[in-house]
Amino acid sequence: MSLLKTAGIQHPSVATQSITINASTGEITFPNNTIGDVTLTGTQTLTNKTLTSPVINTATFSDGVVKGLEEDINVVAAAATGTINFDVSTASVWYYTSDATANHTLNFRYSSGVSLNTALATGDAITLVWLNTNGATAYYPSTIQIDGNAVTPKVPAAITAGNASSIDAYSFTIIKTASATFTVLETQTKFA
């Protein structure tokens, strides 16, 4: 198969087709204006092009100003009880709007198929918020897990109960210090 090389654009499917190059603008026109994927080499300028939304992996942002940042919240019309799998991939804030019916376990994981240990690199930290609604009888997350393994959070004061007739906000900063090893900082704030 022959390969067309013109102005830094390479594509094997147009080797036997005629193309037009505008001498004044450098614009290249291919038959039917469709050639599929192309490889651009060197510096190219794109004008009047439609780009699909990119997927950004491992982006780094430093020393910038962020204004009007919006955060996802997972609002669940249910009562906290049993073990609640807090999937970080869903949202970093979870809000159960019905009155809790028992003390419960929060199991932090990235998703049902990916562990938080896999999603975080050593030295990474993530802050998550659990909003627990209480009625006349107060309950709280009495057991904290990461990927199904119990952890003991560090707290400014012991958390041994929830607050009646309020929403308790629990903030967890999870720091990965080594493989499957985490330091967890927890606070509880009453909103009534």
Image (spheres, helix red, strand yellow):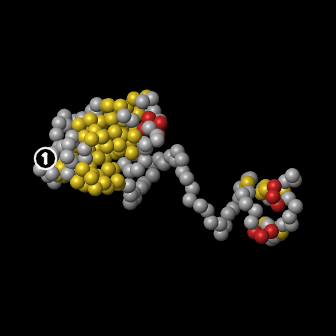
47 vs 2, nearest the viewer = 2
Q: Is residue 124 above or below residue 31?
A: above
Q: Is residue 49 left or right of residue 33?
A: left
Amino acid at pointer 1:
Thr
Q: Dot 1, how many residues are within 10 Å of its Cα: few (below 14), some (14-19), or many (20+)?
A: few
The quadrant holding residue 102 is top left
Q: Is residue 167 above or below residue 181?
A: below
Question: Could one spot residue 25 in this view of the protein?
Answer: no
Whole-percent x, y for residue 192 in the image: 16, 54
Q: Is residue 80 left or right of residue 161?
A: right
Whole-percent x, y for residue 166 in the image: 17, 52
Q: Residue at x 40, y 45 (%)?
A: 88
Q: Residue beneath label 1, please?
A: 137
Q: Is residue 178 above or below residue 60?
A: above
* Total count of labels: 1
Q: Is residue 97 above or below residue 115?
A: below
Q: Residue at x 35, y 31 (%)?
A: 149
The quadrant holding residue 71 is bottom left
Whole-percent x, y for residue 35 in the image: 76, 62
Q: Residue at x 45, y 29 (%)?
A: 179
Q: Is residue 42 left or right of residue 127?
A: right
**Outermost residue toward the left in this view:** 136
166 vs 124, nearest the viewer = 166
47 vs 38, nearest the viewer = 38
Q: Residue at x 28, y 33 (%)?
A: 153
Q: Is residue 26 left or right of residue 157?
A: right
The quadrant holding residue 20 is bottom right
Whole-percent x, y for residue 11 in the image: 79, 56
Question: Could one spot residue 94 in this view of the protein?
Answer: yes
Q: Secondary structure at mark 1?
A: loop
